[in-house]
Image (tube, helix red, strand yellow):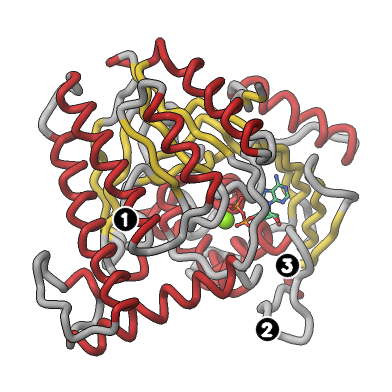
């Protein structure tokens, strides 16, 4: 069974400092890090103005940095080939004649966005990256990378810096990361991932209002109640994902127009949807139900200590979310459905897919003493069905970028 262990802060810092020194022949000036994230509930609600409930993973991306006298950024990542160089004066948008190629776009893009937001021109920097956040598993390695360099740039900035010291400042860093990813890296992203990575709190999940990006820290201290959040990276082959995501968004927008609202968050539960074409009705039913489930989930968490009744209630909401994503939103796949079925048959309180769907990861809320059995049963279930071998992570709600 493959369990993807998180590195301790010390281990991550040691690895990335070593990579830095071997590459650039000097000690780094500072080491920063930022977590990946997992969404607990509230799926495909963000672009409908709804709510999501992400939390930070213990798995982090580490950045060792040292400022330079010029405007050059030299970069190395343990996850990518070779040393790269980008001049901060030559950073241009993804749709320009000279976009920044590859992964360095995430790093210099954040500096570009922060300069636009009023930070004084940055010095160049040598940067080494290493990470234990899985790539492309829907656990947001991109936001972890952006978050780690956002706090590094912020610490280096003499005028307009120091934003990481307050939540309001961190919200501005989130915005810069989103702009970097959208405009410089050219990848569509809403902001949930970056908010989780930069604004989370240990032992808490974040209730994110996707309309105005306001947040509430909600206690979600699973260790205290001997409970584990098991993350299953299904390693399912991604097929047809891009078109499907766009199609879901388009269906939501079309239904909103017919219902006379800007965003589906404005549609009340129990609203008359009979005038919608069948497919749009299904999509709206999911979104409206999912927003209600997310609010209910948060209400259970706000009310106090997670006893067995509450854990079962949370589990039921997770399963209802999955069934809705499976039957109404139609974004699951056999691997994601199998995780849920096998986890429930082996004593999980609940389980669901997380992220956009069609592959990626699923989560299960499990009594701590059953977590290993559930993981083993999922691994065996995958082998029996001829699926790829899954990877497992244990997720405690962890600390923000620092
Ligand atoms: P995810 O769901 O993991 O965020 P994305 O496609 O959004 O998937 O982001 C993955 C991309 O982010 C990678 O292709 C790479 O360009 C960049 N990236 C993330 N982590 C690293 C890293 N440790 N080193 C270099 N690039 C990284
Ligand atoms: Mg990403």
User: Whole-Å distance between the Cαs marked 2 and 1?
Assistant: 37 Å
Of tags 3 and 2, which is closer to the observer?
2
Residue at the (44%, 65%) spot, across then down: 190
Q: Residues within 10 Å of mark 3 (few under 14, many from 20)?
A: many
Instruction: Please give left or right for residue 60 compared with residue 355 in the image.
Output: right
The residue singled out by tag 2 in the image is: 95
Residue at the (90%, 50%) spot, across then down: 82
- In the rendered image, is residue 128 in sight? yes
Indicate the position of residue 141 as horizontal and vertical percent values.
60, 47
The residue singled out by tag 3 in the image is: 88
Disc nearer the start of the sequence (2/1): 2
Residue at the (78%, 81%) spot, across then down: 98
The residue singled out by tag 1 in the image is: 324
Instruction: Please give left or right for residue 164 compared with residue 123 in the image.
Output: left
Indicate the position of residue 399 as horizontal and vertical percent values.
44, 32
Q: Nearer the viewer, residue 121 or 248?
A: 248
């Amino acid at each position: 069974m493959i369990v993807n262990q998180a590195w301790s802060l010390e281990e991550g810092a040691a690895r990335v400092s070593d990579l830095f020194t071997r590459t650039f022949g000097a000690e780094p000036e500072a080491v920063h890090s930022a977590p990946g994230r997992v969404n607990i509930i509230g799926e495909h609600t963000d672009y409908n103005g709804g709510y999501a409930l992400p939390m930070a993973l213990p798995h982090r991306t580490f950045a060792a940095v040292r400022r330079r006298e010029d405007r050059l950024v030299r970069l190395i990542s343990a996850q990518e080939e070779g040393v790269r160089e980008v001049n901060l004066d030559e950073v241009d948008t993804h749709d320009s004649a000279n976009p920044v190629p590859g992964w360095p776009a995430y790093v210099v893009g954040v500096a570009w966005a922060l300069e636009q937001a009023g930070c004084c021109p940055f010095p160049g920097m040598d940067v080494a990256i290493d990470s234990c956040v899985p790539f492309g598993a829907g656990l947001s390695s991109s936001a972890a990378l952006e978050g780690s360099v956002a706090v590094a740039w912020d610490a280096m900035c003499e005028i307009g810096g120091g934003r990481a010291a307050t939540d309001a400042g961190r919200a501005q860093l989130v915005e810069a990361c989103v702009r970097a990813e959208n405009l410089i890296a050219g990848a569509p992203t809403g902001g949930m991932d970056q908010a989780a990575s930069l604004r989370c709190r240990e032992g808490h999940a974040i209730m994110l209002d996707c309309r105005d990006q306001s947040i509430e820290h909600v206690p979600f201290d699973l260790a205290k109640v001997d409970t584990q959040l098991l993350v299953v990276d299904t390693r399912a082959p991604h097929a047809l994902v891009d078109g499907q995501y766009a199609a879901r968004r388009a269906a939501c927008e079309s239904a909103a127009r017919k219902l006379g609202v800007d965003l589906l968050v404005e549609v009340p539960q129990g609203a008359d949807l009979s005038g919608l074409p069948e497919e749009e009705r299904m999509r709206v039913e999911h979104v409206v139900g999912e927003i209600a489930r997310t609010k209910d989930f948060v209400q259970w968490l706000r009310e106090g200590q997670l006893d067995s009744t509450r854990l079962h209630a949370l589990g039921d909401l997770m399963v209802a979310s999955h069934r809705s994503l499976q039957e109404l939103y139609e974004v699951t796949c056999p691997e994601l459905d199998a995780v849920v079925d096998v986890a429930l048959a082996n004593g999980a309180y609940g389980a669901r897919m997380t992220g956009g769907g069609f592959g990626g990861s699923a989560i299960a809320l499990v009594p701590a003493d059953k977590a290993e059995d559930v993981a083993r049963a999922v691994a065996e279930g995958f082998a029996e069905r001829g699926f790829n071998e899954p990877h497992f992570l244990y997720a405690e709600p962890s600390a923000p970028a620092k």
